[in-house]
Image (tube, grey):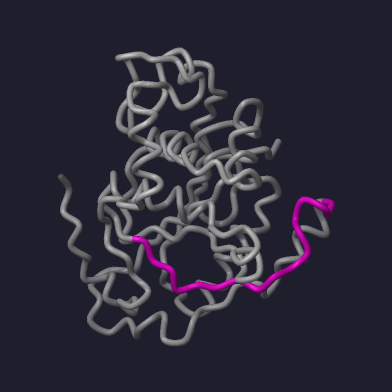
């Protein structure tokens, strides 16, 4: 198991926003996974051959996913997508976000875990607004990040909040780029002064779907304004960017 001790650079972060990597013990989720044990989370077939590290989907379903494994966009920092946003990925993402099928988060985490383990200090899942969280009852990217955190033994940092704005799905490309300007903001004292840190802070941004890149770009802008030396990279489950 990899060492989960925060690096000296991680001391820039206020520890009250930092959740260490730890086993997921949500009772409902645990019961779901026990029921699914031995069955592929996509096709439902019982099989003894499932793909590591999570072993939640079978080999045929893994092979049928539209793997991308590349850099879909230059946002001023490296962005990698595990999958193309095609069927069945779009259906899986929708099932998690809008139908509360929480067990499929393991399929999305499985996709991210096929990418190389990053050399970073912490993970930052793109947050939803308080209003969206109240509506939906959960933050789907944060749920996926919890699974990734456990397997990569990387802490999750939640020092950024988000204002409610018009839904990105309803906007064209140019409107998406401006809709989220200023939507992300640091919580008070979320970043400590850099004194004493022996290296720039490294954060991996996590998101479910990338289209125009507006969400990641605006989140990154919020961070670098307050911490110009911060090293950012991003992993997304799927990219619909052409």
Indicate whether 22 appears above or below 58.
Answer: below
Indicate whether 140 appears above or below 135.
Answer: above
User: How far across and down, in percent of the image, does residue 177 sit?
Assistant: 75, 60
In percent of the image, x 30 and y 76: which residue is there? 15
User: How far across and down, in percent of the image, does residue 126 sit?
Assistant: 53, 59
Query: Looking at this view, is 174 or 63 the one in front?
Result: 63
In percent of the image, x 50 and y 72: which residue is there? 160
In percent of the image, x 35 and y 83: which residue is there? 192
In percent of the image, x 48 and y 58: which residue is there? 125
Give the residues drawn in magenta, as a range.
156-172
In which quadrant will I find the C terminus? top right
Indicate whether 102 appears above or below 47.
Answer: below
User: Residue 163 in magenta?
Assistant: yes
Residue 202 location, quadrant: bottom left
Residue 165 location, quadrant: bottom right
User: Residue 8 in magenta?
Assistant: no
Indicate whether 66 appears above or below 238.
Answer: above
Residue 32 location, quadrant: top left
User: How far across and down, in percent of the image, does residue 18 sit?
Assistant: 33, 70
């Amino acid at each position: 198991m990899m060492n989960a001790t925060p690096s000296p650079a991680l001391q820039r972060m206020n520890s009250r926003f930092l959740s260490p990597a730890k086993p997921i013990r949500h009772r409902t989720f645990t019961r779901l996974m026990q029921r699914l044990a031995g069955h592929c989370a996509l096709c439902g077939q019982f099989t003894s051959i499932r793909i590591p590290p999570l072993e939640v989907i079978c080999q045929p379903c893994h092979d049928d996913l539209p793997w991308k494994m590349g850099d879909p966009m230059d946002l001023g920092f490296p962005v990698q997508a595990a999958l193309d946003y095609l069927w069945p990925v779009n259906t899986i993402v929708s099932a998690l976000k809008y139908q509360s099928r929480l067990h499929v988060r393991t399929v999305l985490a499985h996709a991210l875990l096929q990418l190389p383990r990053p050399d970073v200090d912490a993970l930052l899942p793109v947050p939803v607004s308080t209003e969206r969280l109240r509506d939906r009852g959960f933050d789907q990217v944060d749920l996926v990040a919890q699974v990734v955190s456990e397997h990569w033994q990387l802490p999750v940092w939640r020092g950024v909040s988000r204002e409610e704005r018009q839904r990105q799905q309803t906007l064209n490309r140019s409107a998406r780029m401006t809709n989220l300007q200023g939507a992300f903001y640091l919580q008070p004292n979320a970043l400590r002064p850099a004194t004493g840190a022996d290296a720039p802070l490294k954060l991996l941004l996590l998101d479910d779907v990338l289209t125009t890149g507006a969400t990641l770009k605006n989140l990154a802008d919020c961070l670098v304004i307050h911490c110009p030396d911060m090293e950012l990279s991003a992993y997304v489950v799927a990219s619909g960017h052409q």
